[in-house]
Image: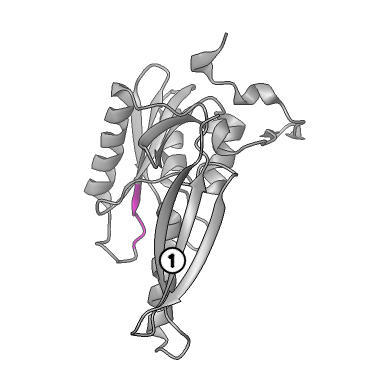
């Protein structure tokens, strides 16, 4: 099992006597830091210390020890091409600029077993619009792909590769547990087996509901004996 790697994230928090816009901006900064922090496993320890500077701004330093799954490996040529496809897709179709709210802000690309690649963008909506990864998976299915090998999501405005949200991790674990997912880690981009992004998960199917725990679903197809 790979050892944890420490990363320091600095977050700015304003005291309550500031204007309403200040806490809102601080909260947004916190959300961005946590969203971009590639925590890919359950063993995350937070050591938080606070200090007030002369201007009255509170700074929180969070030292994060991250677990990187044993299936993680450097990207191969096809996976690097997949990242670029996702990047081109969102760069061509984003509907907002930096620090602006938009409907289409994430692009994704998925590679099928026959090495065909398909892309999509998210459709944000407060009711729960689909993430870019799910759109890409649907596009692949619509064009005849059945087995998926790898998937990646990239943010607009140069935000780079972003790890999947919890809902997407559940979808991957249920439907494509051995598919690889490109995620950011302290050592750079890595390709990880999807099931490893949802440790100790129990597979769900429409027919049987939640199944008993099956350790074989975490097997890395690239390292089977």
Check the image and report above or below for 185 versus 58.
above
User: Percent from the top left, x then y, of residue 220?
Assistant: 54, 21
Residue 215 seen in the current view: yes
In this rendering, is residue 139 above or below 20?
above
Q: Position of residue 202 (x, y in %)?
A: 70, 35
Tell me what residue is drawn at x 27 percent, y 29 percent: 81
Can you tell which quarter of the image residue 206 is in? top right
Q: Is residue 12 above or below residue 32?
A: below
Element at badge 1? helix
Q: Is residue 138 left or right of residue 1?
A: left
Image vertical order of residue 124 relative to residue 86, above or below = below
Q: How is the image coloured?
A: one colour
Residue 109 in sight here: no
Residue sitting nearer the eye, 225 or 141 = 225
| Viewport quadrant of the N terminus | top right
Q: Is residue 119 magenta?
A: no
Disc 1 crowd rating (10 Å Cα; few below 14, some 14-19, many 20+) is some
Task: Identify the residue under disc 1.
Answer: 30
Q: Nearer the viewer, residue 185 or 213?
A: 185
Give the quadrant of the C terminus.
Answer: top right
Q: Residue at x 38, y 85 (%)?
A: 56
Name the residue at the top extreme.
225
Nearer to us in this view, 50 or 44: 50
Q: Quadrant of residue 142?
A: top left
Q: Within the image, what quadrant is residue 115 found in?
A: top left
User: At 50% from the left edge and 67% from the top edge, which residue is drawn?
Assistant: 49
Prevailing secondary structure class for the magenta stretch in the rendered image: loop
Magenta stretch: give its range.
Answer: 102-106
User: As rendered, which of 222 and 90 lies closer to the eye?
Assistant: 222
Left or right, residue 9 beside residue 199: left
């Amino acid at each position: 099992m790979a050892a944890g790697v420490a990363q320091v994230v600095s977050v700015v928090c304003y005291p309550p006597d500031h204007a309403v816009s200040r806490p809102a901006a601080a909260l947004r900064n916190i959300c961005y830091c946590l969203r971009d922090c590639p925590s890919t496993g359950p063993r995350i320890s937070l050591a938080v210390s606070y200090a007030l500077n002369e201007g009255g701004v509170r700074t929180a330093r969070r030292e994060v020890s991250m677990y990187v799954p044993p299936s993680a490996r450097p990207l191969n040529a096809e996976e690097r091409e997949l990242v670029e496809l996702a990047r081109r897709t969102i760069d061509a179709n984003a509907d907002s600029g930096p620090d602006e709210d938009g409907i289409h802000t994430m692009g994704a690309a998925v590679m099928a077993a026959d090495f065909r690649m398909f892309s999509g963008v998210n459709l944000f909506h407060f009711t729960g619009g689909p993430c870019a990864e799910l759109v890409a998976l649907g596009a692949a299915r619509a064009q005849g792909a059945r087995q998926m090998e790898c998937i990646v999501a990239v943010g607009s405005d140069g935000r780079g590769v972003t790890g999947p949200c919890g809902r997407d991790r559940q979808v991957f674990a249920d439907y494509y547990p051995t598919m690889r997912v490109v995620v950011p880690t302290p050592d750079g981009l890595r390709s990880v087996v999807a099931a490893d992004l949802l440790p100790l998960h129990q597979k769900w199917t429409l027919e049987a509901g939640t199944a008993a725990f099956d350790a074989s679903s975490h097997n890395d197809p690239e390292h089977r004996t």
